[in-house]
Amino acid sequence: MTLLQIMPDDAPGTVLLRTEDAGAVRRELAGIGVRVEHWETAASLPASADESTIKDAYRHDIDRISAEGGYTLVDVVRMIPNPGDPEWVKLAAQARSKFLEEHFHKEDEVRFFVDGTGCFYLHVDGKVYATVCTAGDLLSVPKRTVHWFDMGRTPSFTAIRFFQQEDGWIGEFLPESIASRFPRLDDLLARV
Ligand SMILES: [Fe+2]
């Protein structure tokens, strides 16, 4: 289930709101133009399912979202944890660091979580909206919205990505980023 924690952008230790209530999460994020949906997850999908099997399982919703947003490219990105392998640890750290600082894109960043966990931090109007997505969650970051993404210390997720253009995922990074001042994904989840 989605977790939302809102903090002032100049006071990372202050929690303005923390909720797992789906309606409250949807309302708060709709207020800043961010769309969230929760889809019924495909129970029959094996962990080893390949890209086309995953796409077929969610074909109806993929087609709906693509038509609504004009997304012409859809792919599947997957991080399968293997923390015992030093090479995997290195690659996972590289993958994690890629979007861990403030940036924006020239098109919407749309992700559906088939499984696993990831956190989008949306920096809008003086606040940071940390949104933890898990299986069944779709989140759409509108184009030019400043954000960062944390896949956690041990990345583990499968996500369907939607693009309008081939290079739509390219990030434009801000010269100064506030990201490192805020709780990372593991710390957000550990908080009671
Ligand atoms: Fe991004």
Image (spheres, rainbow, N blue to C red):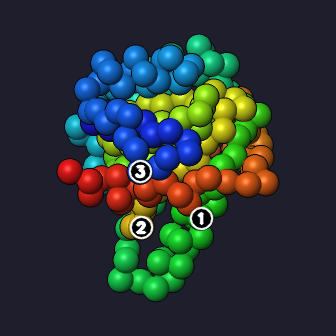
What whole-number distance in Å separates the C-alpha atoms at marks 1 and 2?
A: 10 Å
The residue indicated by pointer 1 is 97
The residue indicated by pointer 3 is 13
**Label 1 secondary element:** helix
Residue type at numbered disc 3: Gly
Residue 50 in view in this figure: no
Residue type at numbered disc 1: Ser
Label 3 environment density (alpha carbons within 10 Å; few <14, some 14–19, many ≥20) = few
Of the residues under marks 1 and 2, which one precedes in the sequence? 1
Residue 77 locus on image (x, y percent): 52, 51
What whole-number distance in Å separates the C-alpha atoms at marks 1 and 3?
A: 22 Å
* Quadrant of the image occupied by residue 141: top right
Label 2 environment density (alpha carbons within 10 Å; few <14, some 14–19, many ≥20) = some
Task: Give yes or no for contact between labels 1 and 2 (Cβ–Cβ under 8 Å).
Answer: no
Between 76 and 107, the one nearer to me in the picture = 107
* Quadrant of the image occupied by residue 108: top right
Residue 70 in view in this figure: yes
Residue 44 locus on image (x, y percent): 23, 39
The residue indicated by pointer 2 is 153
Residue 24 locus on image (x, y percent): 32, 21
In the image, residue 63 sits, relative to residue 157, either above or below, namely above
